[in-house]
Amino acid sequence: MKSLLFSLFALPILLLSQGQAPVNFNLPSGTDTSQFNSQDAKGKYIVLHFLLKTECPYCLKHTTEYLQEAHLFPDVIHLFIKPDKGYLIKEWAQKIPQQSDVPIYRDINASLAKELNIPFGYAFHGQTVHYPALIILNKEGVEVFRYIGEDNTDRYTFSRFAKKMRTLQKTN
């Protein structure tokens, strides 16, 4: 009983001492009328896929690969996020080969990318944007992994993600 009480008090202190407070956010969909609220996803892993602005064939390939394999991890929610206007996201999403009803979310003014310190400064199609990134939040909403691509072609493949998730699931 004492160890349980200690754990209940020590865990929040440990998380705060490491600067690991849960990440809370809302994102509107760019493809439908839905909204994603991270508070509603407690108890599941959340994977944030920060995609590049405007036309991006590598983003399409990345999104397609993850959509095809996402069923392998039912306790994971994948959020595909673009900083574009809604109509541009809709047009882009129509190019996903087996378009499902999975929304593509809008990061208006790249506010979530800024909040999560995704590096800015990547030159892409005549614009300067945030680098492509993948962030995993655990079931409590705390960041447990991040991968920042060096350029448009540098993505975290699904096979690498699957290996990382198996490791995370064993430790949580």
Image (cartoon, rainbow, N blue to C red):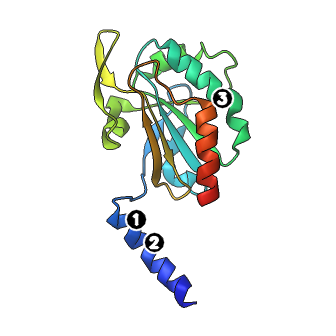
User: Residue 23: image x %, image y %?
Assistant: 42, 52
Q: Is residue 150 or residue 120 the one in the foreground?
A: 150
User: Residue 80: image x %, image y %?
Assistant: 52, 31
Say which amino acid is labelled 1.
Answer: Leu
Say which amino acid is labelled 2.
Answer: Leu
Rendered residue at 32%/30% (across/down): 109
User: Residue 88: image x %, image y %?
Assistant: 46, 16
Rendered residue at 56%/56% (across/down): 139
Label 1: state its secondary structure: helix
Label 2: state its secondary structure: helix
Q: Residues within 10 Å of mark 2 (few under 14, many from 20)?
A: few
User: Badges 1 and 2: C-beta atoms under 8 Å apart?
Assistant: yes
Quadrant containing the C terminus in the rendered view: bottom right
Q: In the visual, does 91 lie left or right of 108?
A: right
Rendered residue at 50%/54% (across/down): 39
Residue that label 2 marks: 11
Q: Nearer the viewer, mark 2 or mark 3?
A: 2
Q: Residues within 10 Å of mark 3 (few under 14, many from 20)?
A: some
Label 3: state its secondary structure: helix
User: Residue 156: image x %, image y %?
Assistant: 52, 31
The first of marks 3 and 1 along the sequence is: 1
Residue that label 1 marks: 15
Residue that label 3 marks: 67
